[in-house]
Image: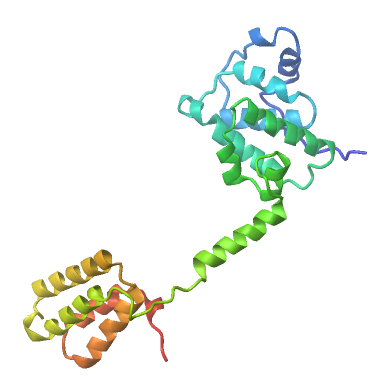
Amino acid sequence: MLRPLQAPDYKYVTEECLREWKGQSAAAFRIPDPVPMPRFLYELCWATVLGDLSPHKCRAALDSVVFAEEAWQEDSGSVLADIVAHLGQDITISGEYRNRLVKMTKSFVESSLIAPRLLQERCEEEFLWEVEQSKSKGQDLKAMEVRVNTRLLYQQTKFNLLREESEGYAKLVTLLCQVNSDLACQNASSATISIIKSLIGHFDLDPNRVFDIVLECFELYPDNSIFYQLIPLFPKVFISFE
């Protein structure tokens, strides 16, 4: 036996509207006053989940209203996707209610009311599999997500200095050594910093290694004030104490 759900208070999806949408003259029925789109769509989805309205009648319901927010006319699919994602995470919606929710979501996609990419962005993996917007089950998608995140965030890039293009680092060291001579004025300092940034971008230099080189040159020339402007440019996370 299904446990009754706590439905929202209907303000715009009234019993009269439900009767008209279910009837033969649904195409001719119109709600006289503009309605707020988010609230109307929320009530419409709940009415469908509770079985008060069949999913294929939702199109007739949407055709019968004019939304108060004209600028939101094209965003109804986005709002519907948010509502579906919210209902999909509601653990109290189970059994036949869940089946109606799945049928409603499929109907929205088939009738182009919701773009599939919006569901894929906002819904949980298990629900995407239920509504046939994913070929993999929730657990498989979760495992795939963990692998991708691990590869992106924790996989280290190894360098072979003998085979690596070292021209950029050579130019950097040369520039930092030249700084010790007569480039300590303010204008020269700004120009040097700009050149270093250009070297990093042009040669795709690793910022961690650039910072190491800057610190080594600073050890050689501790009296040069330009290093006091260079070092704060690098995030503190780059600093490691050995």
Position of residue 231 in the picture relative to residue 34 (left or right):
left
Q: Residue furthest right?
A: 1
**In the displayed structure, would residue 25 be above or below residue 15?**
above
The structure's colour scheme is: rainbow
Most distant residue in the front direction:
163
Side of 129 where 150 appears, left or right: left
Give the position of the C terminus as an image quadrant.
bottom left
Among the 4 quarters of the image, the one containing residue 228: bottom left
To which quarter of the image does residue 82 belong? top right
> Foreground residue, 161 or 101?
161
**In which quadrant will I find the N terminus?**
top right
In the displayed structure, does residue 216 sit left or right of residue 89?
Answer: left
Q: Nearer the viewer, residue 79 or 142?
A: 142
In the depicted structure, whether residue 57 falls above or below residue 165: above
- Give the residue displayed 14% in from the left and 75% down from the top: 189
Q: Quadrant of residue 104?
A: top right
Horizontally, is 202 left or right of 59 in the view? left
Q: Position of residue 132 (x, y in %)?
A: 69, 39
Q: Is residue 204 above or below residue 213?
A: above
Numbered disc total: 0
Residue at the image point whose x is 8% and y is 85% from the top: 181
Q: Position of residue 84 (x, y in %)?
A: 66, 38
Percent coordinates x, y for residue 42 in the rendering: 65, 33
Residue 196 percent location from the top left of the image: 21, 71
State the residue at coordinates (72%, 25%).
55
Q: Nearer the viewer, residue 35 or 190?
A: 190
232 w.r.t. 82: above or below: below
Q: Residue at x 61, y 62 (%)?
A: 146
